[in-house]
Amino acid sequence: MFNRVISAFIVVVMVCQTAHAQVDAVTQMLDKISGTMSVYAAPEMADGKLSGCSLVFEAMQRDYKYLSGNFVKVTGTIGFLAAGKNVATVLKVIAGEIDPALEDLFAGSLKVSRAYLVGGDLRTNFDSLINAAPTDNDGLFSIFQIDPSMDMILQGALAGTITFAFALGDGSSDIQTTLELNVVDVDEVGTRKRSADTQDTFLNCTQQLLESVTQ
């Protein structure tokens, strides 16, 4: 989705403006589309049965802790995975730096060193971490115990927002990202298409998953 929006906008900008004006125009566009760019629900199947429920997201924001105000694009998943009669919470975060001065905008992958959920009351699930492993593109895949993560995710799904935090490299500061779960798309001027289907599908999937492991 990000590449589609960016590509269409850059073609117009390159034809109509000077190099300096191009950077300014792209920066303004990135500011407009920053925030949640898309979220969709993705039920997962294994061995002919429902095995997991995920929210797949794409977001972008300025970062002043690591990138001196440049943009960080974040993609990944939040959800639940079942193994037999057990259910765990998973959080996958992949981050990349976006630089409006570069022709393709992508300055490189950023190494995610930790990631965790943040509740509306500012509690986190960090202490319930079971395991974290690196992914492709320097991302991080983290598995947490079901408590308190499930309650945090379900409350967020009902409220329409989920917040997570992550660190880059050896940094001690954590970047917080809040996802608006009803955003399914965004255009180059920042207009967001919204639908409650993502929340409904995810909550229904989670209910079925929990019922399947208790039978």
Image (cartoon, rainbow, N blue to C red):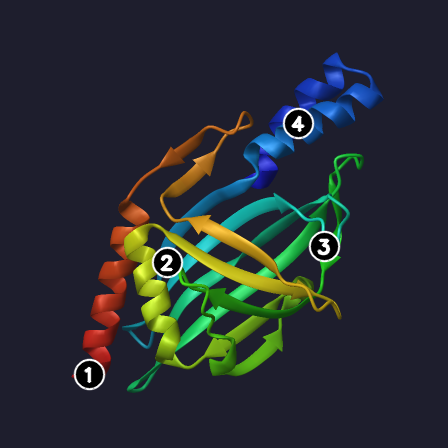
Q: Where is residue 208 in the image (x, y as percent from the top left)?
A: 21, 69
The mark that comes first in sequence, 1 or 4, is 4
Q: Which of 215 and 36 is in front in this view?
A: 36
Q: Is residue 15 above or below residue 111?
A: above
Q: Quadrant of the C terminus?
A: bottom left
Amino acid at circle 4 = Gln
Which mark is drawn over residue 46?
none
Q: Do the residues labelled 3 and 4 touch (CB within 8 Å)?
A: no
What is the residue that sits farthest to the top in this orientation?
A: 16
How far, Cα to Cα, is label 1 from label 2?
21 Å
How far, Cα to Cα, is label 3 from label 2?
32 Å
Which mark is drawn over residue 28?
4
Which mark is drawn over residue 214?
1
Quarter occupied by residue 158: bottom left
How far, Cα to Cα, is label 2 from label 4?
32 Å
How many other residues sit within 10 Å of disc 2, few (<14), some (14-19) or many (≥20)?
some
Q: Mark 3 points at which residue?
A: 65
Name the residue located 51 percent from the left edge and 29 percent from the top edge: 190
Amino acid at circle 1 = Thr
Q: Name the residue under label 2.
A: 42
Name the residue located 24 percent from the left edge and 75 percent from the top edge: 210
